[in-house]
Structure formats: C-alpha cells, structure tokens
Amino acid sequence: MAKPKVAFYWCASCGGCEETVVDLNENILTVANAVDIVLWPVALDFKRKDIEAMKDGEIAVSFINGAVRLGEQEEMVKLLRKKSGLVVAFGACAHLGGIPGLGNFYDRESIFNRVYKEVPTVDNPKGILPQQKTKIKEGELELPEFYDTVKTLDQTIDVDYYLPGCPPAPDLIMAAVTAILEGKLPEKGAVLAPNKALCDTCPRAESKPDKLSIAEVKRPWQIKMDPELCFLAQGIICMGPATRTGCGETCIRANQPCRGCFGPIDGVVDQGAKALSMVASILGLDGEQDMSEEEVKKLIDSIADPAGTVYRFSLASSLLRRRRME
Amino acid sequence: MKKITIDPITRLEGHGRIEIFLDDKGNCERACLQIPELRGFEKFAEGRAAEEMPRITTMICGVCPTAHHMAATKALDDLFKVEPTSAAKKIRELMYNAFTAEDHILHFVFLGGPDFVVGPTAPAAERNVLGVIGKVGLEVGGKVIEMRKRMRNVLRIIGGKPVMPTCGLPGGVSKRISEEERKTIIEAGEYGVEFCKVALGLFDDVVLKNKEYVDLVTGDVYSHKTYYMGLVDDKNKVNFYDGKIRVVDPEGKEFAKFKPQDYLDHIREHVEPWTYVRFSFLKKVGWKGFVDGKESGVFRVAPLARLNASDGMATPLAQEAYEKMFATLGGKPVHSTLAFHWARLVEALYAAERTLELAKDPEITSDDIVNLPTETPKEGIGVVEAPRGTLIHHYQTDDNGIITKANLIVATQNNSAAINMSVEKAAKALIKKGNVPDGILNMIEMAFRAYDPCHACATHSLPGRTPLEVSVYDADGELVKKLVRD
C-alpha cells in the first residue's frame, strides 16, 4: 500500500514549530518511515508546481503552522486545502493567530512607518517603503502583499483539526500523527489536546485557594516569585484558568505564569474575554463591598497591558479580531 | 534583458528569493536577495508590559529564541537599572553557551557539513546530511543527536522549554538550578567539549586535506573585504553574553569599541523598496551601496566576524583552535565567507568549554537568583551575540514600564547587505554570455549557507540541502531555461 502523503507548510511563523518536530528525536524517523513527505520547505525541495499538479485530496494531511499575514501565504494554504484530505492547524499562530496576531493592535501603515521610517537606526530620508512592485534599472522586482490584518488559518480555509501550543508539545504531536495514521480520529474541528484547564494539571494546583482574591496585582518583577505557590494566590496574573492544558506546564515549572498559548478549552469562543471575566471575578473579592468605585478602578488599572495579556496569543481569533484604527 | 528567478532558496523569515538580471551581453549585472516576509514586532511591542518582552520576542525566531530571550532580558536590566545577582549572571551565561554550542553544531552537520565534509563538487544526491554521516561514520552521527539532546535538556532545566524559554527577569532569572540538575549540566558540558574536539578533528582530516575545498576557501569568489563586528570581554576575547561591541576595519585594525548603549552612534540601516529586510551599515563610514572595501559601511557579523573582531578566545582549547585557524588561513583578518564554517566550530568549542566551566562553579546552584528593581523604568538596551551575529534590543517605556518604543536589530539584518553581495559575486563569476551553468545552484547555495542566515532555514534541514529553482526569463517574460536542484 502506498504510504500516505503528508505536507508541512509555514506561514507567518518563526520556525519554532519545525524545531519542535526535530525535537521528536528518534520518533521522527518512525514518522518519516510511515509517510511520504511531499512538501516541507525547511527540509525538502519546495516546488509549488508539484503540488498544483496533484489530484484534489491526494495529500492525506497537511500540517500548516503560522498565521496568515501575506497574500502569498493565503494563496498557498488555499492550494493545500484543495489538495488535502485533512488540514491540521499546527501551533498557536495557525490556531489562534499567536504572537504575530498582536499585529492586529495596529495596521499595515503604522507597522511600515515604524519599521522603515521611525526606528532610530533607520536612515531613510526619502521615506522609501517596500513596494509590491519595484522597477530598478535592471528590471522589476515583486513582493507579496502585506495585509492590514493577521488572520488565523481557519479564517482563511476550512480546518479539520488543531494542534495547540507555542510550540505544540512533542507527545501531543506524536499522538496526533498516530491517530491520523491509524484513522482513529475524533470529531472534525477537535483540538488535539486534553479538554481541561491548565489549573487542573498544574503542579501548584493544591496551593490554589478555594476562594481566590487578589487584593493587589503584582508584576513578575515586583516580588520574588514563590516557586511553589499558585501565581494567582501571589497576586500575579496567570492565564491558567482560561487556558487548555497539555503543555506539560513548562512555563510554570520554570517559575513563570501561564500566558495562554494553548488557547481556551472547548466551548469557549473568546479566550481573552474568559480570562478577563475570571480576573474581574477575583480582583478585590475580599472586601469588595467596602471598596469605593475609585479603588476598584485603581485595582483594575494595576493590571499591566490587560489586552495584550489576556489576548497574548489569541487576538486574531477573538470576537473583536483587531483594534479599530482611528 | 533576461531575468533569473531563484525562488525560494530557503527559509529566511519566511523564504528568500534571488533575482538575477543579465545585461545585453548576457552577463550578470545585478543580483538581489529578497526577503518577502515581515511581522512588525517593533510596532506591536508598543503597549506591552516591558517584562513580557523576553516572552514575546522569543517568537521572532524559533531557531534562536534563546538569543532574543537573553537580549530582551538584558535590555530589562538596563531599563530598570538593576544589576543581576552574581549567580543569575552565571546561570544566564551558562544557558546561553549551551544554546550556542548546540546551534553551531547542528549547523556544522546539517547545513554546512554537506558543503565542506562531502565536498563542493560531490553529486547533489550525496550532498546532504546522510552524505555527511556516510563520510564521518554512523558513530559520529549518533553523537550529534546525543549532543543536541543533552544541550537542549540544559535549556529545558533552566528555561522551561528549549523552544521559547521563559526564565528571564530584570535583575535575574526566575528559577534556581538544583544540585542534581547541576550534575546533568556538567555531564552535558563534558559531552559537548569532547564532541567539539571530534568535530574539529574531522575538519582537519576531511576538509583541510581536500585541496578543492581549501582552494575555494582561499580563492576570490567567496571573499569580501568588509568591516567586522562582535562582542568582546575586557581582554578583547570573544564573548556571546556580555561585553563591548568591537569593530575592526578590512585591514583588521580596531575601528571602534563601544558600550552596547551607544549603538546609535555607530549603526544605521538602509531601506530598499524591493525587500522587507533592512540593511545595516556603519554610520561613520556611510552607505555606499552593495560594495565592500574600507569606504563602504557594510560590515559583517557572526562566527568569522567575531573571531576577526577579537584578540582570541577565553578558554584554552578554543584559543588553540583559534590560533590554528588564523595561522592556516594566512593571519587576521580572514575575508573568505567560507571560513565562517571553521570559525563556527571554534566558537562551538568555546561555548561547550564555557558551559562546563560555569556548571562547575558551585555558585551556580545559589538561590540568590534575582535582585528586585527599584528604579523607575525609562529606556533600556540589551545586546548579545546570537549564533548568527550581533543582536540588539532597545526599549523605551512610560513610568509604569509599558513599552512606548522598540527597536530591534537582528543578526541577519547586519549581514543582509553582505549576503546580497556574496550572492551577486557568485552569480557574476558564473554567468557569462547568457550561459547559466547548472553549477550556479551549488555556488550560490554555498555563498548563502556560510552565513547560516537566521532561521529555520538550515539548522534543521533534514536532508541538508537548500531547495533551489532557477528560472531564466527573457525580456518578454518567456521561460527560456529552468534548472532544478533535486
């Protein structure tokens, strides 16, 4: 029997998802033996026309990482969708927009102005900006279009499954690949990770008070963080309650609070809204009735960059999707 | 006029594309390396809490997240004017060297290896990591995987996870190292030192005895007389984690030595409309276009540049290797782009030795790992040597520590003008009278790979080759020739 054809592709991403695949170590050979990898730009010859020449659905599964920021990326994922039986959004950027999705606090114009005109090292008296088409003496050069708004993969094409995380955990990758190879797949649209909050598997779970109350919000540099106590109990904003587990609690084990890269659990549409309501419900809970409106506002204002914290990885997938530019 | 497109070459912030223009006689007139990718970190950093930058900028590059993590963390020290504890500095430097050793070795085997171990003219089918293993033996192949695993485990112990570490705080680190973990790190360091010695020995046996390759290294096609930049310690020895930035001129004389905080007096960036990447140059020399020489502000960074810009290595075995390299290649500075590969191995040995040295320091397990900031934040600059060159993070904040402005100069930006020049030089040497030989794929690939251009590109390129496709179009856009490297 012919081995199933598999494609890996990247959009606006950093290469960390590929590093994680290499971190499968010996397991990668098992996978490589069981499938026929037809596209992997980091590792293999990449010929778009070979993909174009394939029959629709000929690729068994395409793993696509990265958010969609450029015209070229959109074209490529649409092509892969057509040629693939299954599409898996691989990693936080494809799943939720990820860190590049923070670009949705701004737009193309403000990003270009900052990057090519305003930064203190730029020497650009003519205010040159990258162009989609440039005529130089010798000929013409083209660049792909840079979109105003970062999109998640499922805002661009139909997605069958999601492997969450920045980066996805190696054991979840192996479980997903095995499930696909054995045809033991869950319902379409499933996130291939446990449907539980990070708090449920957190090594500090026992130190989380039954009734949480934050009297004063602390930032990670303002106190010596206790290596064993629940972050929220220390007054530090942790995304654990609003985030799916499966990561191995790696950040917590390095004594840093969760920032939400695995996204929400099933049924939660907007991770940031969920996190905000969680935080609002525990801020000044003890003695709330005695606080003046001003005191409550001050407490809420003490959260540094609330939007960039609760939507750290999920701004592009949120209900708002982006900030409205004036 | 003909236009040749090589698309895509490999991954560089997405992927790169090389366009080659021929003049009326069919000779190469101009070559442009385009980077068709941008994410805009400098802009969306605005509004974020400064302390989150080490956990946001890691996502600039998943291959070298530790470099961004560390540059950001050091920028926070400067921002809050807080000195890290002695133990914290050592923990950071240890982690940083373990990362550099692993990254360099991976490049040696997977990316550079096919060029200089298997040989530049070997059949394409053998010029990959399997060809490297065929030449050096399975045992060495296994050791590479083992070394990567062990060094990445050190990153896991200190930073939580090797892809996207999370331990950096202004004034220190978030987690201490236990005595048991220290033992694991010492073993990893010992393994690393031994492996790097083996790798340098291989370089002697396989590469330096291959006349064809040595001729290429010392020949002109791959040579550029540029300025060189790198961090040095107070004795002018190479340092990846800390020190002053030193620049030497194309004759090897010190041109500048400055504190990272003064980088604005020395570095400027040029913008071209046909690429999303900015091109660094020396402010005091000026931008003269894509040319080398003393009058051009183009400078180079990364392994060879660091060795050229320093007076040696701070560990004994690496110092020996440093001396041998320059003695063999005719003294400092070495201008051959292909010597980046050798320099990378010298640095890997230093990184492994330094990892071991720091792991053996009993202070490394201290629980005094963070000094809390007390100053009001305003502006901070952090610099490290990323595996691919000098990396600068610069933040300004409001009184509450919220970023108002950010500037990032990543390593490959510093080399981007030189990479363009190297590609063009190879194209000019090979394309004559409209004849585009198949060998151009190899030659451009080699020029390009020596820099290890930031990104996934290469370091984990499994079959160890850069995908290349060259299309030659005439003035009407008709395809006249197509070359595919497979």
Image: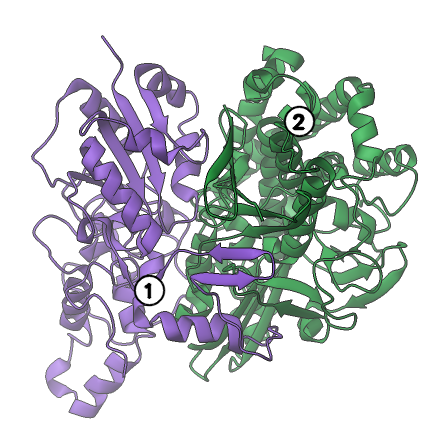
Q: Report the residue marked by disc 2.
A: B115
Residue at image x 26%, y 33%? A62
| Residue occupying the far top of the picture | A1
Residue B231 in the image, given as x and y percentages of width and height = 73, 57
Which one is in front in this view, the residue at disc 2 or the one at disc 1? Answer: 2
Residue A108 in the image, given as x and y percentages of width and height = 36, 70
Which quadrant of the structure image shows residue A290?
bottom left
Residue at image x 39%, y 23%? A28
Q: In front here: B108 or B78?
A: B108
What chain does mark 1 sit on?
A: A
Report the amino acid beneath label 2.
Answer: Asp
Q: In front here: B190 or B483?
A: B483
Chain A colour is purple
Instruction: Give the crowd class for mark 2: few <14, some 14-19, many >=20 residues within 10 Å.
Output: many
In the figure, B264 relative to A199: above or below?
A: below
Q: Report the residue marked by disc 1.
A: A102
Which quadrant of the structure image shows residue B53?
bottom left
Chain B colour is green
Residue A112 in the image, given as x and y percentages of width and height = 44, 71
